[in-house]
Image (cartoon, rainbow, N blue to C red):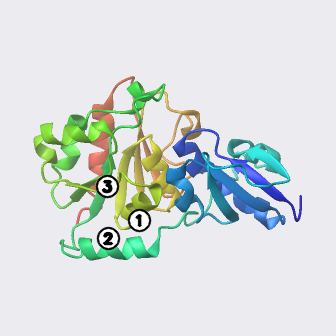
Amino acid sequence: MRGKTLLVTAEQGIGDALQFIRFVAPLAQRGVRVIVQTPSELRGLLATAAGVAATVATTDPLPACDAEIPLLSLPCRLGVAADDVSVAGGYLRSDPARRRVIDTAFARSDVSVPRIGIAWAGAPHHRNDIRRSMPLALLAPLLSLPGIRWYSLQKGNAAAQIDAVPEAQAMTPLDAHSDFAQTAALIDALDAVVSVDTSIAHLAGALGKPVFVLLPYAPDWRWGIAGERTPWYPTARLFRQPAIGDWQSVVASVRAALRTISR
């Protein structure tokens, strides 16, 4: 398809799009012009991925192209091996102008204290949400750690839980409710992220940001069934439930790990 235009459609979830957009770069290296069709809230962010010539929203008219392929079919078509999915240093970029605005706001806080973002729930309509999400109250042992400034990256109704958790009252809510280019700039300005298995975890990993991913006992296929590391995101560390529903052990392990980055 050298010299041709290929329409790549982000046909599944937000996290899937953030994870698999990495496979557009090999197409461009083969001389293919790639247009990515994506939910509108991802357009600006996915445009920063290597090899993406243009993006269109799923609600826009289809652009002229020579062929079309679903995004998650790219690894198979490219012959990508399971151990050859890593991208060093991240593959998405935050917008410099947005980042400057956020840095200016953050400059008023103590720069010697680590800034860590946190997200505890995914979209409630997800079929596995009852297992992958947790109540914010279970994260109180993290929020009570001294020497860390916490920032909420939580989207949706779960953000209202902040008012009911005493340890969360010092947490700063961030405006992560606009498009994902804004969320990316916010995450890029932080030192690390703690997240359950949702789009925030994928975005942090795609940006090359240190991210602590909290996983249920039977996680989604992409995380495998054992180990603290994943080839998908070199900067991610995985914390797995040792038994079904045991978030307390996961939180205890994350708390111990966070002690090493407290200043």
What's the residue at 86%, 53% (across, down)?
Answer: 66
In the depicted structure, whether residue 138 falls above or below residue 256: above
Reading the image, the residue beneath label 1 is 185
Q: Spatial distance from mark 3 to mark 1, Cα to Cα? A: 12 Å
Which quarter of the rendered picture does the N terminus lie within?
bottom right
Q: Quadrant of residue 119?
A: top left
The residue under label 1 is which amino acid type?
Answer: Ala
Read off the residue under disc 3. 117
Q: CA distance from mark 3 to mark 2?
A: 14 Å
View extreme (left): residue: 166
Label 2 residue SS: helix
Assign a secondary structure to mark 3.
Answer: strand
Image position of 81 with respect to 127: above or below: below
Viewed as shown, does residue 206 lie left or right of 136?
A: right
Q: Given the current orientation, which residue lies at the most extreme front position?
A: 61
Q: Position of residue 230 (x, y in %)?
A: 55, 48
Mark 3–mark 1 CB contact (< 8 Å) = no
Q: Which residue is mark 2?
A: 102
Q: CA distance from mark 2 to mark 1?
A: 8 Å
Left/right placement of residue 260 relative to residue 6 reads: left
Name the residue type under label 2.
Answer: Ile
Residue 76: mark in rendering? none
Residue 187: x, y in percent?
A: 38, 61
Query: Residue 7, how many percent across, how many down?
Result: 75, 52
Quadrant for residue 120, please give it.
top left
Mark 2 touches mark 1? (CB < 8 Å):
yes
Going from N to C along the chain, the mark reached first, 2 or 1, is 2
Disc nearest the viewer among 3 and 1 = 1
Percent of width and height locating residue 257? 32, 52
Q: Residues within 10 Å of mark 1 (few under 14, many from 20)?
A: many
